[in-house]
Amino acid sequence: MPYKVNDAGYRFYGIKELERLQQILFYRELDFPLKKIKHILDGKSDRVTILSNQKELLLAQIRKTKRLVQTIDETIDHAMKGEKMKKSDMFKGFKSENEWKEALQEQNTHLVENYGYDLIEDQDIDVDSLNESAIEAQQFMEHMADALKNGVTHDDAEVRSLISKHIRFLNEHSQNIEAEDFVAQTKFFLTDDFHRQMIESNQTGLSYFLYVAAESFAAAK
């Protein structure tokens, strides 16, 4: 019997259940999804092996957090001195190459299966560049989502300014993209189920809003 209930209705778990709960909570602290946790715990690894692996993962997380704190300290120091920070120094401590490959795996599988394009194999993983681009993309999507949420029209000067700055960033990072290319990109995001759902997770209707905003921006050029 995994637990018993006393007169007050409280459940008393046995030691095995508490041990499993502890292991689950360690993995949750490491942001493991529940499905992956269940797969690991239902495997053949013994408790000591699992705990040892969790310890190594947590220590790696501590090292990464310390590096991120150091990056913040260096950023604050530069800001207080009014000095510009090297871009390569701004992103130390963020995702490693392996972490990026893991993060891109689902999207890469979709692209390979549906379009024959291998996102990971067909390009070098430049961690600093990807970190910087990811932050820019996230901020751009957040600003566009806010514009849509607040009723700003797709052809508003604010929206066009956001698109202009985003395209400028892409060109400054060797993507060589014109307004028409951005239209094609947003059309792909709108028509491809995987990417549309990814964008819509930010704000319902955002994929269509991006597309018509990009078309309006290109037409005004």
Image: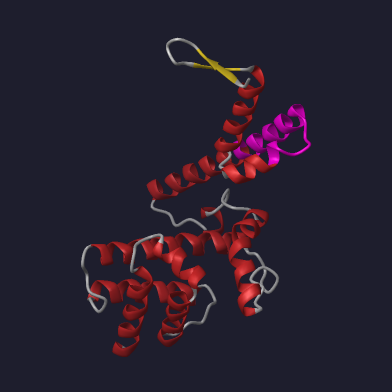
Residue 85 seen in this snapshot: yes
Please tell me whether residue 22 belongs to the stretch shown in magenta: no
Count of numbered marks? 0
Residue 205 picture location, percent across and down: 33, 69
Position of the C terminus, as image quadrant, is bottom left
From the viewer's side, name the closer residue of 109 and 104: 109
Residue at screen point 41% across, 83% down: 183
Residue 97 picture location, percent across and down: 66, 57
From the viewer's side, name the closer residue of 183 and 110: 110
Q: Is residue 163 left or right of residue 7?
A: left
Residue at screen point 72% across, 33% down: 50
Q: Is residue 209 left or right of residue 116?
A: left
Q: Is residue 186 left or right of residue 32?
A: left
Q: Which residues are magenta?
A: 40-62
Please tell me whether residue 48 belongs to the stretch shown in magenta: yes
Q: Quadrant of residue 22?
A: top right
